[in-house]
Image (spheres, grey):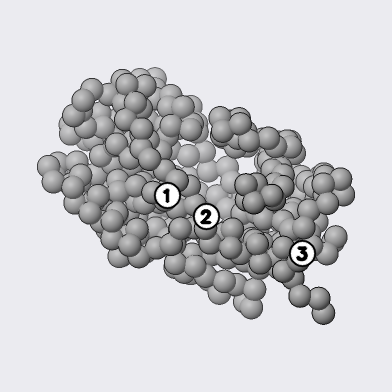
Amino acid sequence: MTSQGHEILFVSRNKEIEHILLDSYDIPYIDRGKGKNGKLGKFFYLLYADFTLYKIARKFKPDAFLNFLHPYPSHVASFIKKPSIVFSDTEHASLHTNLTVPYATEIHTPACYRTDLGEKHNRFNGYMELSYLHPNYFTPDPSILDIIGVKENEKFAIVRFVAWGAAHDFGHTGMSMDNKRKAIKEISKYARPLITSEKELPEDLEQYRIKIPIHKMHDAIYYSSLLYGESATMASEAAVLGTPAIFMDNDGRGYTDEQEAKYQLVNNYTESPEDQEKSILKAVEILSNPDSKDLYKAKRNELLNDTIDTTKYMIEVLLKHEPNKVKSH
């Protein structure tokens, strides 16, 4: 869009990896600070973020706001009477949905989104992960194998454990420590496990932790034989890259459900002890199949043939709100 003369301003919360990624790609941004934990903390942060964005907007004077299901830009956009275009793919993020949708001009979700969000709701045939992992934008870099110390033809699996700290994660516990140990033990029989975790790990699992440069994570996922863990986003990233994924979460997602039903690229399980055991057996089944790499890359091609370039779609949606294209009433 900047090549077409449009000016873009990123405003980013200092959470997890956002600033690291923006810095890695030399993208300028304004830091709106760190969020808060707990329901009361999140409420006060909502007030702070709204006021902070309002001050930024008064200075920048945007023609439109684009965000991924965050209430703050939609609140400010509504207040200053500018369009707010919202993208989302997480059905059970009910708090953010309730705080965002009433103030949004449009909300766009993958076609497989389970919930009807009303007259503002638009569906597209794709996934949010294709906004950066579509072949039009992503080419895997094999140098990641040297970075993470994987030998040529060595099979490895990425294991992802999350902190369960998001607003939509209240009440979740994830995988038990005993089953985490069991999963690593069983995966180790067929592939080298590489753990990436948002939380501290016990000493016996810490030895498997790998520090992959954030902006190189997708290269690692592409070349891995399995993505196993608790992250819906990473499961979907693996799917669109042709790497089989195992995802555990009591709520699930419409997009991971579809990626399992249509392409068998994701295997969905709940957090129950029984499903945790089943997920380990599935990991063994995938890793012990010598043909799995070719099988899942073929499934990826099916997925790409069925879906759109999400970035192209986002730009088309946003440009409909150019001031010289909006009809006066």
x, y percentage for residue 266? 32, 54
Q: Crowding near pointer 2: few (<14 within 10 Å), some, many (20+)?
A: some
- Residue contact between numbered discs 2 and 1, judged by CB atoms under 8 Å: yes
Amino acid type at circle 2 is: Thr
Is label 3 in a helix, a strand or a loop? Answer: loop
Q: Mark 1 points at which residue?
A: 136
Q: Is residue 134 left or right of residue 164?
A: left
Q: Crowding near pointer 3: few (<14 within 10 Å), some, many (20+)?
A: few
Is label 2 in a helix, a strand or a loop? Answer: helix
- Residue occupying the point 58% across, 53% down: 168
Q: Mark 2 points at which residue?
A: 311
- Residue occupying the point 12% across, 42% down: 290
Q: How far apart are marks 3 and 1 (CA)?
A: 29 Å
Q: Work out whether residue 71 or residue 325 is closer to the camera in this orientation and state it.
A: 325
Q: How far apart are marks 3 and 2 (CA)?
A: 21 Å
Q: Crowding near pointer 1: few (<14 within 10 Å), some, many (20+)?
A: few
- Residue occupying the point 36% across, 37% down: 140
Q: Which of marks 3 and 2 is in front?
A: 3
Q: Label for residue 323?
A: 3
Q: In this view, does 86 lie to the left or right of 176?
A: right
Judge whether residue 54 can be spotted in this image. Answer: no
Q: Is residue 192 above or below residue 236?
A: above
First along the sequence among labels 3 and 1: 1
For the C terminus, the quadrant is bottom right
